[in-house]
Image (cartoon, rainbow, N blue to C red):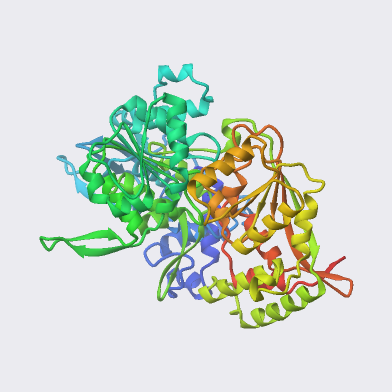
């Protein structure tokens, strides 16, 4: 909600008042700890103010309004689930305005801390930002907290009518000021790419989230060239050669690739992969690199930590995932660190915490405080669980992280032709449909009731359904019954080439490749068994027009590969992994794309007595359509809704 909109604040007050139980309304107190309505401290005051508006049909004073608003901020989580537009506001509801407007307080910088002197009561909700209370030499009370941009923006949103002292204005202007780098004007970079490069040079430790295809690599190379020193680049193994080629292309400097080894003296640019880094972390740290680039930083999103004791018996937190722990260790030994990702989250915004913690462990110390700020948390009796992103949290994130996070979509940087999407339904062959229906009925019968997040065993059953919807041969090894496979091959006869066929299973990729070779197509496949050199050779051949088709697995093709020569992308099989799908889409729509790619989703259906039934393909399709805006949790409720719907006429 917009805390600067007086009407929205009044509606929020009325909405929470209406969530009180009848006996709580009568007693002006909180009797039921049900997580709804006002808490015990606020109940009396906020109920009185709400009843002035709703029951007595009277306006409230400016002082009453400011105090109520300062109380309401702590109820942000409740309010995120309420449609405030549907809350009626009495025509008599308004605020008496005084000629002299009293601010919420004064925000200033003193002795390296943010200090907030409140004029409103209560103001202790500021504690959620880790602010503590103190008194100045004149005995005046104030709150103080760590000086960082996230904290400043948190206080401003919490007390929107505050006054910023000149010390805050000057600090903010200097922090966000980014000077253009003169040398970039001689390059072919787009304007937003120049801004991204300058941003990295200014802030030294930053997360660069340019959408796939927008040149994260070149921006970071040119930024490190400007900063100077020796740079270590950590990336997926498949991208090591890409990095070497890009370094030579843009700054004409040689670089070394260290795979399963390490050198005695660092080059100006050293490229290694995640597995090598984890094997030789201490050796890499001892080489004392000046700079670090971590490519595809979504791979270090795991936030889990455990408390361990050091040699002196002092406890400290340590990442449990080896990859994250090793990247964190080397990042703490390097001055300048750039994390690069086309999509730094795969589900909810809490995915960003570990990446930001690696950049600034003091500012982003607590995972759960970060998650509470940007995500919806279900506080269950057996623990806390993230269940979604808060409304407007994307905007708030960009505001809070303006000095450490540079994010741009493709449309913000360059005018590229858009995708053309088509969902093509393919009726299963009779024997295939029979096998699928049997598995589906058993699956639905075993699903938990309600809107339950899927358990591991349920995900395994979904994989079985995906296989049957593609071709039963993926399960039994002998029943080759797939109208969908035939449709994919047939589409190539009239769709524009070159094309990419995305598959989810190696057997499918191998089989489709063999079928297409027999039909005279020039085709190669990209799977987990394809070597790094063969992958690059395949991409080069595709880009130069030597191939008609690539058959690829999204897990292999989703990072770093440029396939802009592709005119058609056929998704023969898809999993519920939104990150795989999202990244693979951007392989064909990048800088260099000149024509709208045609993206075709093949969806198996069941034709029963003149009714067409949806399958697991439709479940996956519906889930992934939400991926562009935010992750959509896959639940048993969604699956039941779709799989039990057999009402679509042919």
Residue at 82% from the left image edge and 46% from the top image edge: 494
Q: Quadrant of the C terminus?
A: bottom right
Q: Position of residue 526 (x, y in %)?
A: 58, 51
Q: Which residue is more in the foreground, 191 or 263?
A: 263
Q: Is residue 608 left or right of residue 395?
A: right
Q: Position of residue 505 (x, y in %)?
A: 61, 62
Vertical order, 154 against 608 (above or below): above
Q: Is residue 254 visible?
A: yes
Residue at 30% from the left image edge and 45% from the top image edge: 360
Q: How many marks?
A: 0
Q: Is residue 141 visible?
A: no
Q: Is residue 125 left or right of residue 571?
A: left
In the picture as drawn, the residue positioned furthest to the left comes out as 312
In the picture as drawn, the residue positioned furthest to the right comes out as 610
Residue at 66% from the left image edge and 76% from the top image edge: 476
Q: Which residue is more in the foreground, 489 or 2?
A: 489
Q: Position of residue 625 (x, y in %)?
A: 65, 54
Residue at 48% from the left image edge and 47% from the top image edge: 532
Figure quadrant of residue 568: top right
Q: Is residue 488 left or right of residue 575?
A: right
Vertical order, 230 against 363 (above or below): above
Q: Which residue is more in the foreground, 18 or 611?
A: 611
Q: Position of residue 509 (x, y in %)?
A: 64, 58
């Amino acid at each position: 909600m917009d805390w600067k909109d007086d009407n929205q604040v009044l509606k929020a007050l009325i909405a929470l008042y209406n969530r009180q139980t009848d006996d709580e309304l009568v007693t002006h107190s909180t009797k039921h700890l049900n997580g709804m309505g006002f808490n015990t401290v606020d109940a009396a005051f906020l109920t009185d103010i709400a009843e002035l508006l709703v029951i007595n049909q009277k306006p409230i004073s400016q002082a009453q309004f400011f105090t109520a608003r300062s109380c309401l901020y702590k109820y942000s989580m409740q309010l995120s689930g309420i449609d405030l537009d549907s809350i009626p506001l009495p025509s008599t509801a308004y605020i008496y305005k005084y000629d002299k407007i009293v601010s919420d307080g004064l925000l200033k910088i003193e002795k390296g801390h943010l200090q907030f002197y409140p004029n409103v009561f209560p103001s202790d909700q500021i504690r959620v930002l880790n602010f503590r209370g103190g008194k100045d030499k004149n005995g005046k009370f104030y709150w103080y907290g760590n000086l960082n941009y996230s904290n400043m923006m948190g206080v401003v949103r919490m007390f929107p009518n505050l006054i910023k002292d000149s010390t805050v204005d000057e600090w903010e202007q200097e922090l966000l000021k980014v000077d253009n780098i003169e040398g970039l004007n001689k390059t072919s970079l787009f304007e937003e790419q120049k801004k991204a490069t300058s941003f990295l040079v200014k802030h030294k430790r930053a997360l660069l989230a340019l959408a796939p295809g927008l040149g994260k690599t070149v921006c970071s190379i040119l930024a490190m060239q400007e900063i100077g020193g020796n740079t270590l680049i950590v990336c997926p193994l498949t991208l090591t050669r890409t990095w070497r080629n890009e370094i030579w292309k843009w700054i004409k400097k040689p670089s070394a690739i260290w795979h399963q080894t390490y050198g005695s003296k660092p080059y100006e640019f050293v490229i290694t992969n995640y597995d090598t880094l984890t094997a030789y972390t201490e050796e890499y740290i001892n080489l004392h690199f000046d700079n670090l680039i971590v490519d595809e930083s979504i791979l270090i999103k795991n936030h889990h930590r455990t408390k361990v004791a050091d040699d002196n018996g002092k406890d400290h937190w340590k990442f449990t995932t080896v990859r994250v722990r090793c990247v964190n260790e080397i990042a703490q030994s390097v001055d300048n660190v750039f994390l690069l990702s086309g999509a730094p989250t795969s589900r909810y915004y809490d995915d960003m915490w570990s990446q930001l913690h690696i950049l600034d462990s003091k500012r982003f110390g607590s995972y759960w405080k970060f998650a509470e700020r940007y995500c919806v948390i279900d506080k269950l009796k057996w623990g806390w669980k993230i269940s979604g992103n808060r409304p407007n949290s994307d905007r708030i994130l960009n505001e809070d992280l303006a000095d450490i996070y540079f994010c741009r979509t493709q449309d913000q940087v360059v005018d590229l032709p858009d995708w053309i999407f088509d969902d093509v339904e393919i009726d299963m062959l009779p024997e295939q449909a029979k096998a699928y229906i049997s598995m589906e009925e058993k699956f639905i019968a075993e699903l938990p009731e309600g809107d339950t997040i899927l358990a591991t065993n349920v995900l395994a059953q979904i994989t079985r359904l995906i296989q049957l919807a593609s071709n039963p041969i993926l399960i039994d090894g002998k029943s080759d019954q797939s109208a969908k496979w035939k449709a994919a091959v047939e589409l190539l006869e009239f769709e524009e080439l070159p094309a990419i066929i995305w598959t989810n299973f190696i057997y499918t990729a191998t089989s489709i490749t063999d079928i297409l070779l027999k039909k005279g197509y020039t085709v190669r496949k990209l799977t987990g068994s394809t070597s790094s050199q063969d992958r690059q050779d395949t991409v080069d051949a595709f880009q130069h027009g030597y191939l008609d088709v690539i058959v690829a697995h999204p897990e292999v093709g989703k990072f770093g590969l440029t396939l802009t020569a592709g005119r058609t992308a056929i998704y023969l099989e898809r999993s519920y992994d939104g990150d795989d799908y999202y990244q693979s889409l951007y392989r064909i729509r990048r800088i260099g794309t000149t024509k709208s790619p045609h993206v075709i989703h093949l969806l198996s259906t069941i034709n029963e007595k003149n009714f067409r039934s949806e399958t697991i393909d439709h479940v996956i399709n519906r889930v992934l359509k939400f991926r562009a805006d935010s992750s959509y949790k896959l639940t048993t409720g969604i699956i039941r809704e779709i799989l039990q719907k057999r009402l679509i006429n042919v």
